[in-house]
Amino acid sequence: MRLGLVVDLDKCVGCNACAIACKQWNTSGTSGSLTDYRPYGPDPSGVFFNRIRHYETGNYPENKTVHFPMSCMHCEEAACVTVCPTGASYKREEDGIVLVDPEKCMGCNYCAWACPYGARELDREEGIMKKCTLCVDRIYDENLPESERKPACVMTCPTTARYFGDFDDPNSEVSIVSKEREGQELFSELGYKPVNKYLSPRKKVEIEQHEIVEPDLVRKVKDWVNKVVEL
Amino acid sequence: MHPAFSVIFFTVTSGAGYGLMALLCLFNFLYLGMLFDKNIFLIFSGISAVLFTMGLISSTFHLANPKNAWRAFMRFRTSWLAREGLLAILFYPTLFLYLLLIHLDFYKDYFLLMQIYSVFIFFFAILIIYCTGMIYACLKTIPQWNTPWTPINYITIGIYLGGLIFFALLSFNDFNINPYKPFVLALIFVAFIAKFIYYLSIKGPRHEIGQATNAAIKLKNTNVRLLDVGHTGGTFLTDEFGYKVAEKRLRKIKWFSIFSGFFIPFFLIFSYSYFFENIFLCLFAVLLSFTGMIAERWLFFAEAKHVVNLYHGAQKC
């Protein structure tokens, strides 16, 4: 299995619900807590597994806002796992999820340096590296109805911009949508083979534009007559 | 990258310690026997051990969860950090045995064995400095580090600092230091040239991957500009990777590191026996070169730009 996410950038409205749902689920989950620093102070900060950035693409009048949620890509060649000196970071054989074992992590930040996506954040209170678990404590929970065995971000997305599934299965939803719409891998040049895919916004219908033409003599006379009549 | 002082101190000091040890063994080998009286040799080795031990201890201050530091040797098959840690630990018994054999006068009775052992320690010490450099050089996410010049700089600067300390120790013990002068000058020169080439090589954005936000965000057939980073305060990412220094200040510190770290020590050593012969001058040169190299290592971090900055609006890395 090769579990991962697909994000449809056409559907995402940048509401941050996925980041909040992620925080709510995971702060009491296996990788919890997701510590907040100075939550009511002047410069609140804290640990997130999922962050949403906002960009503008194209040039006027074809420009467009793109909301861009990013979490761990669960890379096939995960550099964070390669560089980890303690063995705290590991990639699961069975489903490809990249996890941190908090019992082994020594908080050296080295894995965060190796990650091009900024997917790992150090919890300064606990001294342990935190990252997206793909809600590993949820997707296999047999006490939940099968329709809810999905990551919290996918469950909560109000526009269904997020898909979750197995990329090794050619008939899974994620495989089909990412094939249909040429799902993009971020920083594929680095060779880490990120599993998560991003669906680029479709091309917008071009707005027709008319050139302003200098009116000819007949037109000018007609305009003048019209003005006189209106008086 | 955020320049953490513990890491800067670690790389400079342990580099100097291993550099000094490598040179001590090299001279034993080249001299075909003990260069010094064995007691002086043991003291010199002790100074080198103090240096690299101080460096290694300093490196643990950088950990957020130091109680797990002992696990840092586990993944030596893939991680350069683990390799460095493992070799640094293995170096202690290896060196201890070497010093014990010297103490037992093995150089007289088992000459060939000790010659081989000297060369072994020489390469061992340099290998550790190489691993320290590779911790940084192996990261494809930081184009300014991901170059072969990183480990070359670490090795040449480590040996240069070791050489300078060696020189100071010699003059402190009233040795005839003149034969070693050109050697130390050459070490400074080589270290400077290697660092100079490094600075030239990182001048432009090095990697195609790091050149535009487009590569990071990967939208088809369109360009990308940042509208909003999505957080009001700082995050771990902006603290760790978003370190910014004014160009002007960077340039000032670069000139300081070049003068204090290379030019002035070179001049001081060059003029050592011509004009004056003062041990304090030698110590001053060591102190200056250390300060200069601390500044150089600070620049190594401050000038490095992690590609995650592309998501925060940087246009090149």
Image (cartoon, rainbow, N blue to C red):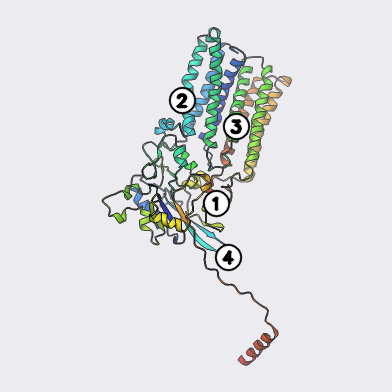
Q: Residue at x 53, y 43 (%)?
A: B141
The disc placed on residue B215 is: 1
Distance from disc 2 to disc 4, alpha carbons, whole Å, reads: 61 Å
Give x and y (percent) for residue A114.
49, 41
| Chain where mark 2 sits | B
**Badge 4 amino acid:** Tyr
Farthest residue, direction right: B274
| Chain where mark 1 sits | B
Distance from disc 3 to disc 4, alpha carbons, whole Å, reads: 49 Å
**Badge 3 amino acid:** Ile
Q: Do the residues bearing badges 1 and 2 touch, measured as CB atoms within 8 Å? A: no
B92 vs A127: above or below? above
- Rendered image quadrant of residue B24: top right
The residue singled out by tag 2 in the image is B89
**Badge 1 amino acid:** Ala
| Chain where mark 3 sits | B
In the image, B155 versus A10, the foreground residue is A10
The residue singled out by tag 4 in the image is A60
Nearer to us: label 1 or label 4: 1
Q: Do the residues bearing badges 3 and 2 touch, measured as CB atoms within 8 Å? A: no
In the image, B175 versus B96, the foreground residue is B96
- Rendered image quadrant of residue B302: top right
The residue singled out by tag 3 in the image is B152
Residue B106 at least partly seen: yes
Nearer to us: label 3 or label 2: 3
Q: Do the residues bearing badges 1 and 4 touch, measured as CB atoms within 8 Å? A: no
A211 vs A163: above or below? below
